[in-house]
Amino acid sequence: MPRTISREMAEDIVRDALRGFATEAEIAALGEDEPLRSTLELDSIDFLTFVERLSDACRRVEESDYPRLSTIHSSVDFLTEDR
């Protein structure tokens, strides 16, 4: 049976996965609906690292799911949805 996580836990996972791409203060100040790639200037390798961190922490992310990880809000939605 899949493990269910809270929205708060999922947001912590997303923000933790962004560490190293920006300062702690920048990550803390990042709004839920700001586009991650352009706001944090993530290149394709950085974004792939972010995806791998999410996969390691929570659930497998397929390439077809990448567009669903565009903001913190959409990433939390993805991580908390029923599978």
Image (cartoon, grey):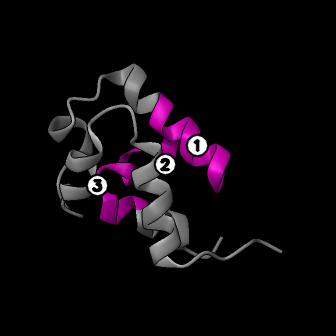
In 3D space, how far apart are the residues under numbered discs 2 and 3 (Cα atoms)? 13 Å
Is the Cβ of the residue at disc 1 closer than 8 Å to that at disc 2?
Answer: yes
Q: Is residue 63 visible from the viewing direction of this image?
A: no
Task: Check if residue 69 falls in the magenta segment.
Answer: yes
- Callout 1 secondary element: loop
Residue on which disc 2 sits: 65
Write down the region rendered in magenta: 49-75
Is the Cβ of the residue at disc 2 closer than 8 Å to that at disc 3?
Answer: no
Towards the viewer: 58 or 16: 16
Residue on which disc 3 sits: 71
Give the mark nearer the N terminus: 2 vs 3: 2
- Quarter assignment of residue 75: bottom left
Q: Residues within 10 Å of mark 2 (few under 14, many from 20)?
A: few
Horizontally, is 83 left or right of 9 in the view? right
Q: Quadrant of the N terminus?
A: bottom right
Residue on which disc 1 sits: 62
* Residue 6: mark in rendering: none
- Callout 2 secondary element: helix
- Callout 3 secondary element: loop
